[in-house]
Image (cartoon, helix red, strand yellow):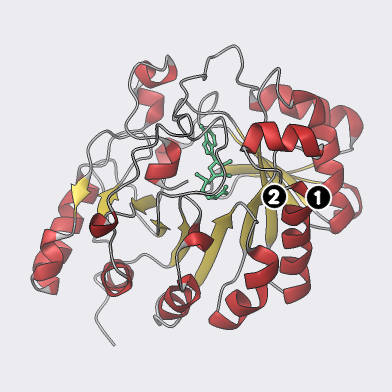
Amino acid sequence: MAQRTEGSLVDSKGRVASKLRVSVTDRCNFACLFCMPDKGKVDWLPIQDILDFPGVERVVRTLSELGVDEVRVTGGEPLLRNGVETLVKAIADIPSVRSVAMTTNGWFLAKKAKALKEAGLGGVTVSLHSLRRERFGKISGADALPRVVEGIDAAISAGLSPVKVNSVAIKGYNDDEVLDLVDFAHSRGISIRFIEFMPLDGLGIWSAENMMTGKEILEKVSGAYGLVPMGRKKGSTARLWGLPDGKSDFGLITPMSDPFCDDCDRLRLTADGKLLSCLFDTQYYDLKPLLKGDDAALKRFIIETVRKKPDGVAYMPWIREGWAKPRNMNAIGG
Ligand code: SAM
């Protein structure tokens, strides 16, 4: 087995990277209004620029030798990428990778849940922003609510664990459904996380006024449920609360109102092979040329990239005001 170099992925603030989000495509069959540009105005990455599976596997293996042990496959819509379960298996088979999870819109999940489980996928997070069919269609650009719910149930039946729901609550769109969404997750014994709307949307509709803050969501949920505080694990994006009866938990991801950059342990690999050490960074580091060379050069480049990790969104007030947008969320990999 390859040597793991302890502490190699340390940035200038002393944070150690141990988690990786791998985007396998920027393409999506939905068009969520807080993520994608207008239909017809999407500049998809050219197919020839997309990193092939051996390339992705090599990057993940190299990162795992440097200390990364949790991997999440995402996109765009990861289940749009042909044969993604073979990539999941290849990653799950890397000895130092402890867990492989996926974030998906759920459209193909009923069909794929069993194969993903067999490939070694651990948890799956399904995005669900409304329980009203018409509204779901408006938010996601797809009349897909029944099929997404079927996907969530198939993931539970297949034994994927944990199964979580991700919701983005936006004022004037779905802020009146916070409790319904919590009830939905609670009734199935699965977790739910609300992510604050970030100015990484293709339509440019983000504003400090329409973003529902974690505090506002918490007020709604704690008024209806006796919540049990569970805190935030170091490096985790979510602050958690247990729901009554301990069947499920509720979490808040608050990159805008209460960022968690000081112990961020995450890296991202975009579908076109670029390494990103901060979701909000505008600087992307291309690994593709390095894949033509040896592991030592690739490792040196990755270590250098991590050293340059920005302090975080907490130190980029301009981002909060929506002035600078690196890429849209679908092209970064959420
Ligand atoms: N297609 C998959 C999905 O729908 O879950 C995976 C990719 S999506 C970019 C990953 C997550 O990012 C989703 O849960 C989505 O709700 C979230 N997301 C996208 N744009 C966002 C934004 N502007 N602010 C906050 N979360 C966002």
The residue under label 1 is 185
Task: Please say if 270 is above or below 99.
Answer: above
In terms of image quadrants, where is residue 320? top left
**Quick one: SS at disc 2?**
strand
Eyeballing the image, is 143 above or below 39? below
The answer to the question of whether label 1 and label 2 lie on touching residues, with beta carbons closer than 8 A, is yes
Along the line of sight, the residue nearer the viewer: 167 or 147: 147
Q: Quadrant of ligand 1?
A: top right
Relative side of 44 to 134, left or right: left
Tag of residue 165: 2
Residue drawn at the location 54% of the way across and 64% of the way down: 101
Q: What residue appears at the point 49 percent right and 49 percent down from the top-left corner?
A: 28
- Residue extending farthest to the top is 209
Closer to the N terminus: mark 1 or mark 2? 2
Number of the label disc, if any, that sits on residue 25: none
- Report the number of discs: 2
Q: Nearer the viewer, residue 203 or 263?
A: 203
Q: Residue furthest bottom?
A: 1
In this rendering, position of residue 284 left or right of residue 319: left
Rendered image quadrant of residue 133: top right
Q: Is ligand 1 closer than 8 angstroms to the Cβ of mark 2? A: no
- Note whether residue 273 is visible: no
User: Which residue is located at x 39 percent, y 29 percent?
Assistant: 313
> Which three-letter amino acid code belongs to the residue tagged 1?
Ala
Is residue 218 left or right of 273 when viewed as pictured?
A: right
Q: Position of residue 154 (x, y in %)?
A: 75, 68
Asked if 123 appears above or below 103 in the picture, the reply is below
- What amino acid is at disc 2? Val
- Residue 31 position, x and y percent, is 55, 38
Residue 35 drawn at (x, y percent): 50, 34
